[in-house]
Every structure is written in structure tokens, then in C-alpha cells.
Image (spheres, rainbow, N blue to C red):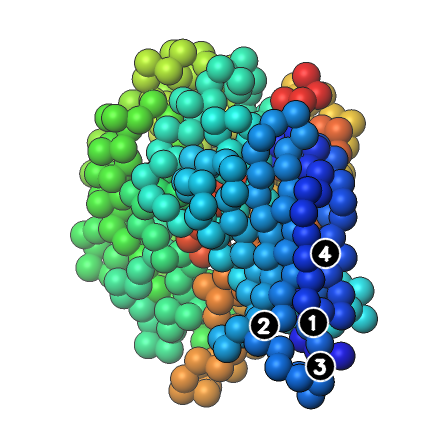
């Protein structure tokens, strides 16, 4: 047996794919399907010859598919060169919103024996339709900054409960500006792209997980990734970017792009007072100094569930942006610390205004996480009407357990699980698996990701939205 690995093909288009050509050389296996239906998937296993049997550097398998009823063609090519196996998507007779005809998109490679019952490979997601195809793994910048406005003709009559959007986990932790003595960026940094880049580039993120911290000098607010570990280690973690800078970037974006931006505010922590929750004075300072500066704040009745408002109405048919600050707190009574006062309904909303199911798996392996999140999705969304229940957040980010972090710290160098590497090599390649688990109205409204660096998350949300569109 030689090296082997899986590929999940996700057809998120309204066109069936039919084989028009194909070839394999020095491959034990390359199980391409001759036909892949619209809005369906296919799993391909590749296995190269044993290198002891001869020169394997020219081993390859490829297939060309055509989208039925069109002239659009693309090729999936698996080959092994001196730098190891790779799977490539090549656009033959088609363009996407990120790439042009002839471009080759590197999908990567994950080693996995055929005997394994778990999917551990890479995904090739192609979604959309003529004029607006999106693929996974694309990296060309500045093309998805208007994706909601561009799709308003198809999603404008829907609500946030009826579509899927990409989100990021610990969105402000794309840098480490301060850390506790034993913390390290490998256990605290969840992202590598700034808020501006998450918004503007190929990522298309529209839901941001923002966890504010008041710094130890009692002057500035930052994003944070700080947790209480145990009585001995107490609070450990790091601060990310300055919230004021993120506000500036969001304002710059919404002046030119009429999109819906959601900031989910939670886990507020005051380092200045010994890692205590914000008191009322600190909340007011955060509002006045930073969040009140946000432009294009969405206005609605304080008693309204804004997740039932049509997207076209939120965006005034594409004439304005809509920024939503979701306080992950119940509406306060009396002198509760997090009350927003007169701001309620003027950009600031509580849980009852934006019902959200967001329960992470607390898992440090992919299969446990996927099983947990799919089980919760089925419980929350199965056979559900869009007017019932809550917006469902699919947490697609692994969690380092205390022992993982301690092991890394004790080693003096990082040999344990890196959050960014987990995202790049474990969770992002498995996004194709999520598509198989969706059915009926059982699909996520937000996919919360670590390490967003390519179009994979956006391609998956497009595939889900296109599939839902086909059923209306």
C-alpha cells in the first residue's frame, strides 16, 4: 500500500456534474463518480502505488466534470511530486468570483488510510451558479466584500433565521498585544486576519465574536482570550487588538459596503480589578468610548425579535449597511450592570431581540466536535419553522483543554495543539462533512470558525444558501 487520502466533493450548485474525461497512472485507487447530482456530495479515496514498486513521482489521477446544461468545466487532479501528494482544482471552462479560467487552486492533502472509518481529508466545495461561483481554498482578495448586497435579489426576502453566514470565533484575537506570564500565542490566538481583512477579503465574515477586556492600566478596551484554569494557575491568557481600532475598521467598511455586520458581545472581563466582570461604570465607558462610535447602527423596536426582519428591510433594499451589537445578556432589571439604557433598539440588542443557540462542544478532537454540534443542530432545528426557536450557531472550533495548554507551557516550546494549526489542518478541511449532515431546515445559520484564511467557510455558506434556495 502507498500513501492514501480522502477528498470530499461538495456540489453546492443547481447543476449535476457529469464526467467527460479522466485518467489515472500508478494509482491503486481513485474512486471518482461519473455523476454527482446537484446539491449532493461524493467522497473520493486516492491511494498511490507503493514507492518500492517504482518511480511514484509521476503518479496521478484526474477527472474532468461538466455541469449539465452548461459549458462549465473543471478538473480535479491528484498527483505526487517531490514535495508530496497534492489535490488540485483547475478551472477549465469557467470563472469564479475569485479565480479565472485556467487557474489552479491547491486543495491540499491529508494522509489517511482507507481502513479508517473516520473522514480525515480535504474538501472541494463549489457553490453558486452562473456568474457567481465560489470555491473552497481560494485566496484572491477583495472580491467578497459585497456578497450580501450582491445576493440581495435572492436573500432579500429572507431573515437571519433562513440563511447561513460565516462567523469567526474570538474574532479580535488575530494578534497578541499583552499576555500573562505563562501564556503563549499558540494557545490564545484564534485568528490571523484583522477585522478589516475578515470583512473585506475572500473571507466574507459577517458575525464577530467580540470579548471585551479592560486593560490592567484601566485605560483601554481590548479583545481577550483569557480563562480561569484552576486555583493554582488562576487566570491565564492574552489580549488581542484594541477595540477602538476594530470600530474604526468596521466604520471604514460600512461606509462603502451595504452589508449586515453582527457583533456578539460576551465574556466581559476587567483585568484592572482582578479579572472581575464589568461593573456598570465599565460598561458605560465601553459604550461611550468605543461602541457608540459605530456608524450605521441598525434601529428597531426594543421589543422586536430582529432575527425575523427581512434582510432587504434591514439593508433598505441595499441602500444602507446595518450594524447590530448583540449583548449576550438578558435584558436587565433594576441596576444590573450591563444595561444599555436608551441605546436599546438603537444598534444595541439583548438576547430576546436576537435569540441565539451557541453551545460549543468543549472538544479537542474533530470527530467529537462534529458529532456534538450536529446532534445539537438536529435537536434545535429539525422540522423547525423559521419563526420558531433560535438562530443556530455551529461552533466549528476545537477547544484546548487545560492539560493541552499546560503540556505546551511546561515544554518551554510549543509541541502541543496549536489553535491555528488545528483550524488549518483539522477543522477547515472537514467543512465538506457538514454539508452531508444538513437536511430540510436543519442547517446552521452561522458557522463559527477559527483560523479563517481562505474561502472555505464562505463557500460552505453559499452551498447551504443555494441548496435552500432550490427548495423554495
Residue 235 is at least partly visible in this image: no
The Cα atoms of the two marked residues, 3 and 4, are separated by: 19 Å
The C terminus lies in quadrant: top right
Mark 3 burial class by Cα count in 10 Å: few <14, some 14-19, many 20+ = some
Residue at the location (49% across, 15% down)? 153
Sooner in the amino-acid sequence: mark 1 or mark 2: 1
> Disc 2 on helix, strand or loop?
loop
The Cα atoms of the two marked residues, 2 and 3, are separated by: 13 Å
Mark 1 burial class by Cα count in 10 Å: few <14, some 14-19, many 20+ = many
Position in image of residue 76 (x %, y %): 60, 52
| Residue linked to disc 1 | 26
**Above or below for 309 versus 138:** above
| Residue linked to disc 4 | 44
Sooner in the amino-acid sequence: mark 1 or mark 4: 1
Question: Mark 3 near mark 4, Cβ–Cβ under 8 Å?
Answer: no
Sooner in the amino-acid sequence: mark 3 or mark 4: 4
> Disc 4 on helix, strand or loop?
strand
Amino acid at each position: 500500500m502507498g500513501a492514501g487520502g480522502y477528498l470530499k466533493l461538495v456540489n453546492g450548485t443547481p447543476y449535476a456534474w457529469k464526467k467527460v474525461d479522466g485518467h489515472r497512472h500508478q494509482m491503486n485507487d481513485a474512486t471518482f463518480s461519473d455523476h454527482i447530482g446537484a446539491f449532493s456530495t461524493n467522497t473520493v479515496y486516492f491511494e498511490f502505488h507503493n514507492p518500492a514498486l517504482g518511480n511514484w513521482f509521476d503518479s496521478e489521477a484526474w477527472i474532468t466534470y461538466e455541469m449539465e446544461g452548461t459549458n462549465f468545466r473543471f478538473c480535479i487532479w491528484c498527483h505526487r511530486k517531490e514535495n508530496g501528494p497534492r489535490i488540485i482544482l483547475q478551472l477549465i471552462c469557467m470563472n469564479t468570483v475569485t479565480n479565472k479560467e485556467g487557474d489552479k487552486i491547491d486543495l491540499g492533502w491529508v494522509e489517511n488510510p482507507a481502513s479508517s472509518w473516520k473522514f480525515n481529508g480535504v474538501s472541494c466545495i463549489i457553490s453558486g451558479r452562473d456568474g457567481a461561483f465560489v470555491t473552497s481554498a481560494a485566496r484572491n482578495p477583495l472580491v467578497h466584500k459585497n456578497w450580501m448586497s450582491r445576493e440581495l435579489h435572492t436573500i432579500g426576502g429572507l431573515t437571519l433565521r433562513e440563511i447561513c453566514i460565516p462567523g469567526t470565533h474570538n474574532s479580535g484575537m488575530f494578534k497578541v498585544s499583552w499576555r500573562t506570564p505563562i501564556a503563549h500565542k499558540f494557545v490564545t490566538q484564534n485568528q490571523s486576519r484583522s477585522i478589516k481583512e475578515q470583512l473585506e477579503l475572500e473571507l466574507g465574515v459577517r458575525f464577530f465574536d467580540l470579548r471585551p477586556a479592560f486593560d490592567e492600566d484601566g485605560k483601554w478596551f481590548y479583545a481577550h482570550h483569557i480563562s480561569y484554569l484552576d486555583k493554582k494557575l488562576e487566570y491565564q491568557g492574552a489580549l488581542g487588538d484594541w477595540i477602538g481600532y476594530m470600530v474604526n475598521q468596521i466604520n471604514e467598511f460600512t461606509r462603502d459596503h451595504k452589508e449586515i455586520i453582527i457583533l456578539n458581545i460576551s465574556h466581559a472581563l476587567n483585568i484592572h480589578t482582578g479579572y472581575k466582570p464589568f461593573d456598570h461604570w465599565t460598561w458605560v465607558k465601553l459604550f461611550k468610548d468605543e461602541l457608540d462610535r459605530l456608524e450605521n447602527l441598525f434601529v428597531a423596536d426594543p421589543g422586536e425579535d430582529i432575527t425575523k426582519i427581512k434582510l432587504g428591510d434591514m439593508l433598505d433594499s441595499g441602500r444602507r449597511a446595518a450594524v447590530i451589537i448583540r449583548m449576550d445578556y438578558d435584558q436587565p432589571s433594576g441596576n444590573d450592570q450591563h444595561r444599555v439604557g436608551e441605546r436599546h433598539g438603537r444598534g444595541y440588542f439583548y438576547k430576546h431581540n436576537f435569540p441565539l443557540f451557541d453551545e460549543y462542544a468543549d472538544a479537542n478532537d474533530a470527530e467529537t466536535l462534529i458529532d456534538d454540534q450536529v446532534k445539537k443542530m438536529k435537536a434545535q432545528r429539525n422540522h423547525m419553522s423559521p419563526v420558531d426557536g433560535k438562530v443556530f450557531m455551529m461552533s466549528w472550533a476545537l477547544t484546548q483543554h487545560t492539560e493541552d495548554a499546560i503540556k505546551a507551557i511546561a515544554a518551554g516550546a510549543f509541541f502541543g495543539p496549536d489553535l491555528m494549526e488545528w483550524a488549518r489542518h483539522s477543522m477547515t478541511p472537514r467543512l465538506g462533512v457538514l454539508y452531508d449532515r444538513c437536511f430540510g431546515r436543519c442547517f446552521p445559520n452561522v458557522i463559527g470558525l477559527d483560523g479563517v484564511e481562505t474561502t472555505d467557510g464562505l463557500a460552505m455558506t453559499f452551498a447551504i444558501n443555494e441548496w435552500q434556495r432550490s427548495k423554495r
